[in-house]
Image (cartoon, rainbow, N blue to C red):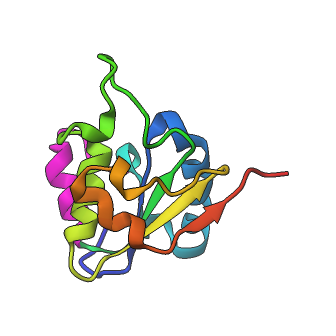
Amino acid sequence: MGASREAIFIGYRRGDTADVAGRIYDSLADRFGRERIFKDVDNIPFGAEFGDYIKSTLSRCSVALILIGPNWADATDANGGRRLDDPNDWVRVEIETALATAGLQGVPVLINGARMPAADRLPESLQPLCKRNAASVRQDP
């Protein structure tokens, strides 16, 4: 991606919204060009350090679409802990970075009937997301 702030970042949790993220990516890539759309492993060069690359990429984007599926807030790790409670969870890191990046518009996108989680169910660093107007994407009929 170039240095311009015209790129779009798609942040999602694979176990919850990977199918929809793929459709959104394809649709945006057709409209704006693949070089202007970032979606996790599709764009990360081999050998790149994931966290540094994500943070660098977000700083070059103008929009971050934060996909929230029905199980987004309650997704758990292998030990049964809620993933969003882990400060090293990549989805959490992406959202925290997006919210802290000046000039980046973070847009929550509610997928397949998901609702915006109550702020008190989220880590404090993610609570500002709840104040953002969300877009909705429904399943294809």
Q: Is residue 26 above or below residue 46?
A: below
Residue extending farthest to the right is: 141
Q: Is residue 52 magenta?
A: yes
Q: Is residue 102 magenta?
A: no
Q: Which segment did they paint magenta?
A: 43-59
- The residue depicted at 33 percent of the width and 24 percent of the height is 77
* Location of residue 57 (image quadrant): bottom left
x and y percent of residue 83 in the render?
32, 34
- The residue depicted at 23 percent of the width and 56 percent of the height is 124
Residue 64 visible in the displayed image: no
Q: Is residue 81 above or below residue 108?
A: above
Q: Nearer the viewer, residue 103 or 133?
A: 133
- The residue depicted at 29 percent of the width and 16 percent of the height is 79
x and y percent of residue 106 in the render?
38, 70
Residue 26 visible in the displayed image: yes
Q: Is residue 60 left or right of residue 28?
A: left
